[in-house]
Amino acid sequence: MQLLLIAGIGSDHIDLKAAAAAGSIIAEEWNVVAIAYKAYDLEEKKVGTVGAERIRRLLLQRLKPFNCTLLYHDRLKMETKLENQTGAKFDEDLDSILSKCDIVVINMPLI
């Protein structure tokens, strides 16, 4: 993991020393300019998403115009109509998605 963005307040639930030792950047605030210097284009990247049915669907719909290869993993497969609409392919093996993708978005509730 190269960059960890936290959509919330604080980073007290993350072992900052371990993340820094692993070479990860922790974005403690939404200062896009400060973190964007390591940003890469999404075009033609393999993007995987894990979990959170509604959020995943919205994410895949928004990524489609970037010409990404879109993969998803969840306990339930999307309807064929929605797969066709987003261009996303189901992968039932989580480890497979993690090894295939340039970017993995994990959409899980905290509870």
Image (cartoon, rainbow, N blue to C red):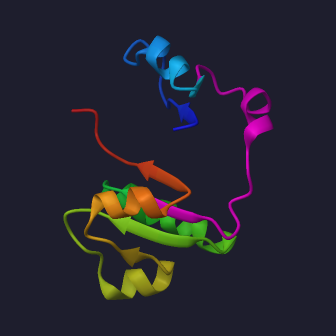
Residue 91 spot, x, y in % from top left? 32, 71
Answer whether residue 49 is visible to the viewer in this image: no
Residue 78 spot, x, y in % from top left? 30, 76
Q: Quadrant of the C terminus?
A: top left
- Nearest the viewer among 8 and 37 is 37
Which residue sits at x=55%, y=18%? 20
Vertical placement of residue 95 versus 78, above or below? above
Q: Residue 27: which quarter of the image?
A: top right
Which residue sits at x=51%, y=38%? 1
Residue 21 in the magenta stretch? The answer is: no
Please provide the residue range marked out in magenta: 27-49
Residue 7 spot, x, y in % from top left? 50, 32
Residue 82 spot, x, y in % from top left? 39, 81
Residue 47 in the magenta stretch? The answer is: yes
Vertical placement of residue 44 versus 79, above or below? above
The count of marks equals: 0
Q: Is residue 22 left or right of residue 55?
A: right
Answer whether residue 76 is visible to the viewer in this image: yes
Which residue sits at x=68%, y=69%? 66
Which residue sits at x=33%, y=87%? 80
Vertical placement of residue 107 versus 67, above or below? above
